[in-house]
Amino acid sequence: MRVTQRRDGMTVRAIAGTNVVELAFDVDPALRQGLLGFAVRRQDGGEGAGPGKWIVNRRTFAGQEQGRQYWPTDQAPVQKFRWGDYTVEPGKPYRYEVAAAHGSPGDVRLGPSVELTVATEDGRNVTDPADGIRHEVHFNRSGAASQSYVDQFDGQTPEQAGEPALRWLSRGLLEAMTAFIASARPGDALHVAMYEAQYQKFLQPLKDAADRGVTVQILYDAGSSSTAPTTENHDALRAAGLLPYSRARAGLGSHISHHKFLVLVRGGTPEAVWTGSTNMTEHAVYAQLNVGHAVYSRPLARTYLTLHQALWKDDPPLKDTRALIEQAWPSIPPASQDGGPGVVFSPRSHDEAMEYYLSLMSDARHLVVLTTPFGVDKRIEDYLVGSPPAVVKFGLVGAPGPTGGQIQRLDSIDGTRYVMPARIEDNTLSRWQIEQWGEESHVYIHTKFLLVDPLDDEPMLVTGSANFSHASCADNDEDMLLISGHRSVADIYLTEFLRMFDHYAFRQLLHDHRAGVRSLALAPDDTWTAPYFREGSQRQRERLLFSGAGPSR
């Protein structure tokens, strides 16, 4: 949901996802003079819900610290033109008052203000008004939430805090996926294709479904690559009593069966598909950034079921899998049977999928948002380097390599901002994640999605299992949803992306200034606004784009 209000020389735009509300600001030149920032007050429940509370800031003016970690924004204003509220809940109204702050440190005076009410999306039911198709979209918190975790659970590890801490980290992702499984009734069927199927909190609901008379088929990766989770999958499925309902996908040899989908068949009719980036592992729920996306569309579910049954029946090798997919789904993008989402399956003989994704980016008018978990494909890098700076590009990468030089190069190009995970705090959650999984890459981005012009009326979303690489297009089992024109779904993905991007960008700022943290103090005057009003600058483009004052207005 998006709401924009303009008053007394100030513009405020709210973009609401499920657990994030992104606020974007703009001011006329006269109001910019002496601007110390923005004070933000939130009322839970929308209009008539009381005076509300001032949102707090983790930065303040030099000399105003007084041993505190947080300051209300009527005393320590927000000094940027886009700010995210990460403490909202799904499906609820919120009223925001945003005031322009002037004066001086210690004597902040609030001037003109704008009020607006926005409702967050209910991730369990995001229905497209154009076609009536119901979506579910669930993001977990991921490793970037480490400081919030410490504040929430007073320094306890998840083992010490127990189930409430795990639920907080999951933020509904595990619960929604298991609820999808639990919705299958006796006589229904669940057809699963999963790269990693190891966490008993996923597997036990599948065993329960089988025990109550649901047909269960679990296709799991068992290739010969050095990273294949064959043994782990086999042992976990055996421990859950699910081996009789499972089949190893070994036909791809040294390549991987990277799917992460479930098809629900009710009374013989395919009803819905669950897909996204989430493996059935603890790591996927409690550390990586992941998304689960369900679509209640019979034609789409039938398409996924057709592929699952072909792989289940014959476990075809790479060459035959390519032929199967190209014969059944020859075009990219595929022709939609109901006006709803399409899907791109891999592997294919050529890189048609990558060419299609690049064409979507090349046709962007204003904004491209991309997550690339395991580096940046050279063709994508070429696009980011060579595309017009007027199109704002944001990227998150999960594992950029030992130096990250490629990403640093991208981040220095006008029009493109690309960041990678960084772990600054050595706190309870980050130590627990390292101990659990034996590496510091627990913070990496594992989502695989592309948003093109998400703030326009016809946003485009690509989301699923593929890592935007040659292997994901030509060698691996992969599936990617194509969703066009669904603003609510785009808002959820965009706000979650910005949550992660801003967290990691701030960590990078801390890293760059670790020898002089005082430089992070708020500016005592309006000099902080200069980059946002420099003609042709990246910050100016972002200010105009997100506030709605630019070409996407």
Image (cartoon, rainbow, N blue to C red):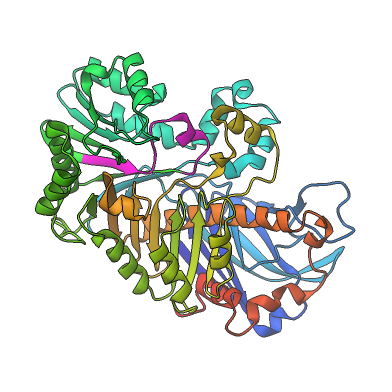
Which residue appears at 59% of the width and 32% of the height? 433
Q: Looking at the rendering, which quadrant does residue 485 occupy?
A: bottom left
Report the quarter where the N terminus lies.
bottom left
Instruction: Give, as a single range, the part of the protein colored magenta.
Output: 272-289
Which residue appears at 29% of the width and 57% of the height? 483
Rendered location of residue 418, percent (x, y): 54, 62
Q: Nearer the viewer, residue 323 or 487?
A: 323
Q: Is residue 13 magenta?
A: no
Up/down of 56 relative to 535, above or below? above
Which residue appears at 29% of the width and 23% of the height? 206
Q: Is residue 282 magenta?
A: yes
Rendered location of residue 142, percent (x, y): 53, 41
Residue 25 seen from this side: yes
Q: Is residue 326 left or right of residue 445?
A: left
Q: Nearer the viewer, residue 70 or 377?
A: 377
Which residue appears at 49% of the width and 47% of the height? 445
